[in-house]
Amino acid sequence: MPQLPDGVVRDVVRAPARVLSTPGLDVDPTDPDVVQLAADLLATQAVSPGCVGLAAQQVGVAWRVFSVDVSAHPKTRTCHGAFVLCNAVVVEGSRRERGREGCLSVPDLTGDVKRYRRVVVRGLLPVTGEQVTIATDAFEAVALQHEIDHTDGALFLDRVAGAHALHARQTYL
């Protein structure tokens, strides 16, 4: 991950804010505004308890940029540390399984969502614009798909099978 400037913590947008259902625009990862957004996403994620990923839509910007860091999550198997991807897409997926998901933008609910447990994702790094391919599994694979959905204007609520698959969020602190 290239060196980013200091990030600024931004407010997280909550559903039903319109930006959350707005597909993001492809970005130039070398654009200074995109680089600053990348730093801000990591800074905002770092101060948000339990947050393992954050998309531009969640801070009010409809761009195809997101951050992920699953290193502290107990369900993590493969981990690439903290990183930001621009214009990312899933190029390959296998082993779809149902799992519980939550989201900072939907703070009161969790939902059962079927996602691939092994994925290959391709995207561009901010600052350099280098294309990277990430092959991962388990929790990091789910986090990447969740954030790519955000950049497509979708929430996990759009992927649950129905009302029976929604649950009130439990707090374990």
Image: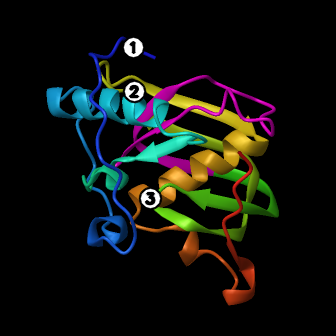
The residue labelled by disc 1 is: 2
Q: Quadrant of the C terminus?
A: top right
Q: Is residue 55 above or below residue 122?
A: below
Dot 1 amino acid type: Pro
Identity of the residue furthest to the front in this view? 173
The residue carrying mark 3 is 150
Q: Is residue 163 above or below residue 87?
A: below
Tell me, yes or no, if residue 143 can be seen here: yes
Please state the horizontal and vertical placement of residue 55, each as a whole percent of the image. Answer: 41, 48
Residue type at tag 2: Leu
Q: Residue at x 23, y 36 (%)?
A: 28
Crowding around mark 1 (Cα neighbors within 10 Å: few <14, some 14 to 19, many 20+) is few
Is 35 above or below relative to 173? above
Q: CA distance from mark 3 to mark 2?
A: 18 Å
Residue 108 as seen in the image, left or right of residue 40: right
Give the camera-side residue of 51 and 94.
51
Q: Are marks 1 and 2 in contact (CB under 8 Å)?
A: yes
| Residue that lies at the very extreme toward the bottom in this rendered image | 163
Q: Secondary structure at mark 2?
A: loop
Badge 3: how crowded within 10 Å, few (<14), some, or many (20+)?
A: many
**Secondary element at image label 1:** loop
Pointer 2 residue: 125
| Label 1 – label 2 distance at C-alpha | 7 Å
Please provide percent x and percent y for residue 6: 28, 17
The residue range painted magenta reads 64-91
Judge the density around disc 2: few (<14), some (14-19), many (≥20) Cα neighbours within 10 Å.
many
Position in image of residue 137 (x %, y %): 76, 40
